[in-house]
């Protein structure tokens, strides 16, 4: 599995405190069956700004440490970018880092609202050659309150220009009932492309996917979940073609087998 959103780099944001914790998170991830982690430190969120070259060099150090531990895991560079008005200028100035240096930017909204003109930003980024992975929209208050906002937005956008990533702790309910309800609603609508951990530590939000994987399989079926955790992230990272998405199939209950 590929974890596309993870704060595994040491001492760079509110994620892993130091290299020991980073390696601890990698150990948990590897035991979960995660084989690739994209390190996505916060940037331009009001508290953190990290230069792309710093992220790349920290990723190299962590890969060295992971190798010394003998873990079957690889770390790739990325960044979680807050949607700010000057986003395009930051991109053109080389201050943003796309996932694995590819053509997708991991973006996040402020907690309470959706930034004005977001639809226009999708188009402008596309013109500049970039697509968007939108991190955990199910945790956004506006999207929780106005559930039709995202389905409507997505219906007006070309497939794969806007990729929806929900977080494992939303599916399991650890992020609260509203995030859980919204995540399940988006899953049932077939609007979720990727599930990631958005892990921040070895304890409070560890890089664990297994429980969410089981929950997700019960909602949309195993084949679609496999695409969310393997095929779609792989296409994002390698710039290869996206898979034909499996139908959202709600597994039948035992009492429905004979109906
Ligand atoms: Fe994050």
Image (cartoon, rainbow, N blue to C red):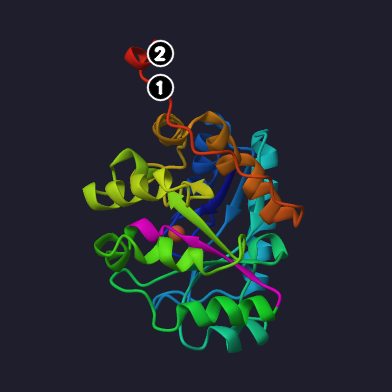
- The span shown in magenta is 129-138
8 sits to left or right of 36: left
Crowdedness of circle 1 by 10 Å Cα count: few (<14), some, many (20+)? few
Indicate the position of residue 101 as horizontal and vertical percent values: 71, 65
Crowdedness of circle 2 by 10 Å Cα count: few (<14), some, many (20+)? few
Report if residue 258 is visible in the image.
yes
Q: Which mark is residue 257?
A: 2
The residue that label 1 is drawn on is 252
126 sits to left or right of 80: right
- Which of these two is toward me, 158 or 38? 158
Name the residue: 48% across, 33% down.
249
Q: Is residue 137 magenta?
A: yes
| Above or below: residue 249 compared with residue 108 | above
| Above or below: residue 148 compared with residue 252 | below
The reply to whether callout 2 and callout 1 are in contact (CB within 8 Å) is yes
Q: Secondary structure at mark 2?
A: loop
Indicate the position of residue 57 as horizontal and vertical percent values: 68, 64
Q: Is residue 237 magenta?
A: no
- Which of these two is toward me, 133 or 150? 150
Ligand 1 in which quarter: bottom left
Quadrant in which the N terminus is drawn:
top right
- Does ligand 1 reach within 8 Å of label 1's beta carbon? no
Q: Residue furthest front?
A: 259
Indicate the position of residue 227 as horizontal and vertical percent values: 60, 40
Q: Which mark is residue 39?
A: none
Name the residue: 28% across, 60% down.
144
| Above or below: residue 253 compared with residue 231 | above
Name the residue: 55% across, 74% down.
50
């Amino acid at each position: 599995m590929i974890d596309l959103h993870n704060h595994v780099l040491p001492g760079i944001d509110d994620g892993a405190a130091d290299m020991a914790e980073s390696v601890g998170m990698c150990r948990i991830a590897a035991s979960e069956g995660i084989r690739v982690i994209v390190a996505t430190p916060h940037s331009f969120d009001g508290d953190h700004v990290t230069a792309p070259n710093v992220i790349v060099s920290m990723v190299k150090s962590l890969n060295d440490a992971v190798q010394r531990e003998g873990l079957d895991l690889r770390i790739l560079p990325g960044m979680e970018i807050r949607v700010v008005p000057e986003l395009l200028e930051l991109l053109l100035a080389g201050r943003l880092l796309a996932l694995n240096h590819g053509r997708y930017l991991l973006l996040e909204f402020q907690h309470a609202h959706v930034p004005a003109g977001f639809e226009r930003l999708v188009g402008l980024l596309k013109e500049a050659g970039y697509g968007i992975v939108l991190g955990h929209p199910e945790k956004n208050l506006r999207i929780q309150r106005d559930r039709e906002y995202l389905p409507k937005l997505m219906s007006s956008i070309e497939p794969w220009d806007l990729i929806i990533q929900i977080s494992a702790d939303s599916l399991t309910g650890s992020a609260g009932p509203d995030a859980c309800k919204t995540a399940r609603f988006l899953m049932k609508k077939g609007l979720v492309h990727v599930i990631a951990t958005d892990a921040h530590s070895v304890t409070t939000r560890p890089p664990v996917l297994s429980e969410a994987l089981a929950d997700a399989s019960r909602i949309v079926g195993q084949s679609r979940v496999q695409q969310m955790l393997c095929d779609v992230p792989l296409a994002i990272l390698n710039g290869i073609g996206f898979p034909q998405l499996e139908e959202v199939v709600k597994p039948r209950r035992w009492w429905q087998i004979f109906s």
